[in-house]
Image (tube, rainbow, N blue to C red):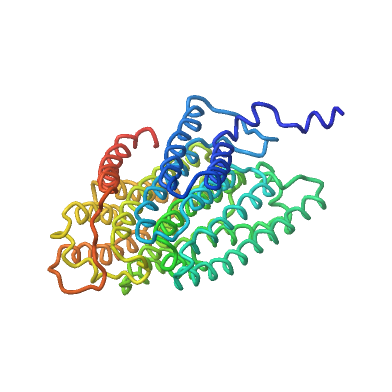
Amino acid sequence: MENVSVSIPSAADWLSVSAEAALVCTAAVLLVLKVLLPARAEKFLNALAVLGLCAMLALPLAGLSGEKEASFFNMLFPLPSFELFALACAIFTSLMAFRYFSKDKALARAEFFCVLMICTASMMLFARSINLFVTFVSLECMTICMYILSAWSRRSAPSLEAAVKFLIVGGVSGAMILMGLAFIYGAGLSCGEDFMYYANFADGLNSKLFCFGLVFVFAGLLFKLGAFPFQFWMPDVYQGSPTPVSAFLAVASKAAAAVVIFIMIMSMRTYSEKFVLALSVFAAATVIIGNFTALTQSNIKRLMALSGVSNAGYILVLATAAASFALDPERQSACFTVLLFYLVAYMFATYGIFFVVNSFAEEDDSYQNMLDYCGLSKISPAASSTLTINLASLAGIPPTAGFFGKLLVILMAWFAGLYWLVGVMIVGSAASIYYYFVWIRTAHAEKKGGEMVFAGLGGSASTVVALAGATLLFGVFIFSSLPAVF
């Protein structure tokens, strides 16, 4: 009985997953209300879902005042900043979904918010996990939800095609992580150590079996991040998925994978030139392929996917710097702080752009291209202005948040002695200016054609303007925080 009592989670354990539990419980309540209430109460349920997500922001905020210990059987890392980030992504996705569902009344709505909440909860657990078993289970739950969300427009052939491709690729990446898990677990049995916890990774580096398994785990995470050589699935999935889902994939899913990669690197606490070299090669290839492939792309959602690939490369540059700082915990911690800055700046810009992409009248925007934006500045000055600001942020133009985010990444790589990688990042960023500014120029050009019709920002106008303002103000905030970071 003593052993049984020890295994029962305490109140502190349950409190540590309060945000995740609240998401799952709210999703369950929405499903029950969907069954009990009449069909005309659909709008009420949608509003209730968004209000619930906004209220949940208070749960991780309560944990920001002090450092909490790892909890729930010591398998979770206290990371309230990422919980806030994931909830913000879920809120923006929900707001975008209102406009998307108004185009097709036949799509299920309340169920969409339920799946989104469960996906967000799984994502939080995935990013906070310090145990490979919990990492894998939460990752698979998150990925299954993504499969469902990407196929939400079940009458759209591109959406179903995207879901099938996503299912195949996600299955392969999940299998790779599971294979790595098996090797790591086997290494632990042979060495008499518990390598399932990140904290013990430094001890496992002496085992070839452990290192072999770690390669599989990192390969699976590179799949989720959308980095070379596993970036090929992103353009197809982003193009076919509903626009709110594409935005959620572009920001939240990528951020979760990035956080897990960083926590694993910081847990190894050792310097390996071969490991740093391998990360450098993947980072450089990702930056080059993402930016130079996007130069000839005219489809908007495919362009945003390739932009996501290039940003995954910048994140890997920062991860390489963190690996180089393995003997300097303070610099490593600074790299993680820079990662959070970069992800927030990327979130503001990417969601601001996708809100504009979502504002066209057509139900299926998978074939939306540059020509559809001709004359946008005359049709909607607010939309073209916010689009310009957010594209400039992704391009790294001052004084936007994206500029300071890239600057911080370059500085950390420079301090780590990764000079050639800094050069690759600068070249890639310079190339990205071309395709981002082609989009900006098109939006300010005379109307020449385009098959799709811009319907206006509508109810999302205030959100889009707020995101553009945040892109500018957050850049100033990062600049003022530079002394604290370094």
The answer to whether 341 appears left or right of 263 in the picture is: left
Question: Does 230 appear above or below 140?
Answer: below
Picture coordinates of residue 380 (x, y %)? 17, 56
Picture coordinates of residue 333 (x, y %)? 49, 39
Question: Does 329 appear above or below 5?
Answer: below
Q: Nearer the viewer, residue 418 or 219?
A: 219
From the image, which quarter does the N terminus lie in? top right
Q: Residue at x 46, y 50 (%)?
A: 39
Q: Residue at x 78, y 29 (%)?
A: 6
Q: Nearer the viewer, residue 400 or 134?
A: 134
Q: Nearer the viewer, residue 427 or 220?
A: 220
Picture coordinates of residue 172 (x, y %)? 62, 67
Q: Using the rendered image of the protein, determine whether residue 18 is visible from the camera's viewpoint.
A: yes
Q: Nearer the viewer, residue 43 or 274?
A: 43
- Tally the marks: 0
Q: Using the rendered image of the protein, determine whether residue 321 is visible from the camera's viewpoint.
A: no
